[in-house]
Image (cartoon, rainbow, N blue to C red):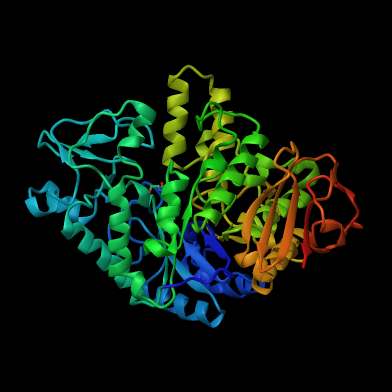
Amino acid sequence: MAFDKKKVVYQIYPKSYKDTTGNGVGDLRGIIEKLPYLEELGVDVIWLNPFYPSPQRDNGYDISDYTAINSLFGTMADFEELVAVAKSHGIDLMLDMVLNHCSIEHEWFQKALAGDKFYQDFFILRDEPTDWLSKFGGNAWAPFGDTGKYFLHLYDKTQADLNWRNPHVREELFKVVNFWRNKGVNSFRFDVINVIGKDEVLEDCPVDDGKPAYTDKPITHDYLKMLNAATFGQDQISMTVGEMSSTTIENCIGYSNPDNHELSMVFNFHHLKVDYDNGQKWTRKAFDFEELKNLFHTWGEEMSLGNGWNALFWNNHDQPRALNRFVDIENFRNEGATMLAASIHLSRGTPYIYMGEEIGMIDPDYDSMADYVDVESINAYDELLAAGKSPEESFAIIQAKSRDNSRTPMQWDDSLNAGFSTGTPWLKAGKSYQEINVANEKEGPIFTFYQKLIALRKETPIVAEGSYKVAYKDSDKVYAFERELNGQKLLVLNNFFGQEVELELLAGYEAGQVLISNYDAPELAKKIRLMPYQTLAILVD
Ligand code: NOJ
């Protein structure tokens, strides 16, 4: 079981990529249509968010049938065609496996509710709820029908946590993964996989909404080894990534060190909390560069020393667009987008691009709460009002933090609905679509820079495989690191601000060669000047 470190992953939110039927929802045939575009970009794997039957209460993360296609998105024949056509473009599919919970409309839950004891043990039922909070607001327990018992839901009250302690549950879930392997899929993303391990006796945990009581429990590593052995670990080549909620480096090394036979790599989210006030998401604060830089350094270096492997990303379907968070987009959208890209594509780990990032998409800038669809945002707005915030301030927070920011339709051109759909889109297109769209941007500085970065990882072993070492640790403007492989060294400098910065180059690099920059390559000398949001990578043999 090995995975290829030269590969780059592109994430598609199927609901918002391309609608070919006019029903306002993106579909599998829309993805097939766009495969030549993705091949041109150069990506190797596409991660698709869930497209299985689901009441869509959490946009498909509430699955009611794990081995079928939601008719909103197409048919199984469409899916099979997608796998085959993607392969002909040199692209593999990565499927989203939501194995911590299922929808309460799933037949397992329905049978449990109807009194079937076998299926009741598929869920986490208790007479007394604990004090844990749901990640989507409120208590994490809901009444289990009229039995007087409660079932655990760490997410929405329609997403019931599955009982991984029960071997029958594990067996059923492993069958799900194998079903998709049999369709020719060898890459998987495992949703919130570090919360699957729950203790037999559950206790109150007043710390951090109860998270320590169920996050990164040692038994999770055992479950992952079982999952690996029973499914993708049997493939010669597979790529797997675990989404790790509120995790630690130590655990992530455990999850991704190849000797442990768990997963290929891990997502963690610490770097995307550096604009949270007091650790709270539903607040507004400028990002803390010092915190960001230190987090990247600690994770980069320790994962490198422990032989773990990070999935590297700025954007996904749960995050507002990184450009709005980290860049002065009024003045430096191109420079900022390319610098952010280089800061992860040249680092140690596997880079993920979220649809639209390659053309510099930004948040939609909606005018009213009525434009939002996401359950988490709607709950959060109500909670902000209830906590005494004004409607204006509450709305401003939703505008900055909502997950819908990244879920808006892909901006293909300047026609109606950004060329996404001829019907009414399930979520409105962003206001910027007439300027920021594929038709305008494909020859532009952002898209072409992504193409170069993706190609560099394939051509340059140090980019794909080199170790990670902290550089310019004390800089208050520049996030920099060194990579090393077989005596070669690569220095990557990223100016995170809209002002020029002067630097003294580390010894040896003035005689090096510029591998890539988002400005004209400067003359290398002892002292160099980085332009606003400049990225500069220098190679020495
Ligand atoms: C993480 C997913 O990325 C998110 O979209 C979802 O709401 C939760 N897991 C629950 O499945």
Whether residue 489 is visible, yes or no, is yes
Q: Tell me: residue 516, above or below residue 77.
A: above
Q: Looking at the rendering, which quadrant does residue 331 occupy?
A: top right
In the image, is 365 to the left or to the right of 517?
A: left
Q: Looking at the rendering, which quadrant does residue 127 occupy?
A: top left
Of 247 and 11, nearer the camera is: 247
Quadrant where the C terminus sits is bottom right
Pinpoint residue 132: horizontal percent, then vertical percent: 30, 31
Of 133 and 348, nearer the camera is: 348
Residue at 13% of width from left, 50% of height from top?
121
Residue at 57% of width from left, 53% of height from top?
313
In the image, is 331 to the left or to the right of 255?
A: right
Of 354 and 476, nearer the camera is: 476
Whether residue 116 is visible, yes or no, is no
Q: Tell me: residue 414, above or below residue 325.
A: below
Pinpoint residue 512: horizontal percent, then vertical percent: 83, 63
Pinpoint residue 110: horizontal percent, then vertical percent: 17, 51
Pinpoint residue 193: horizontal percent, then vertical percent: 36, 52
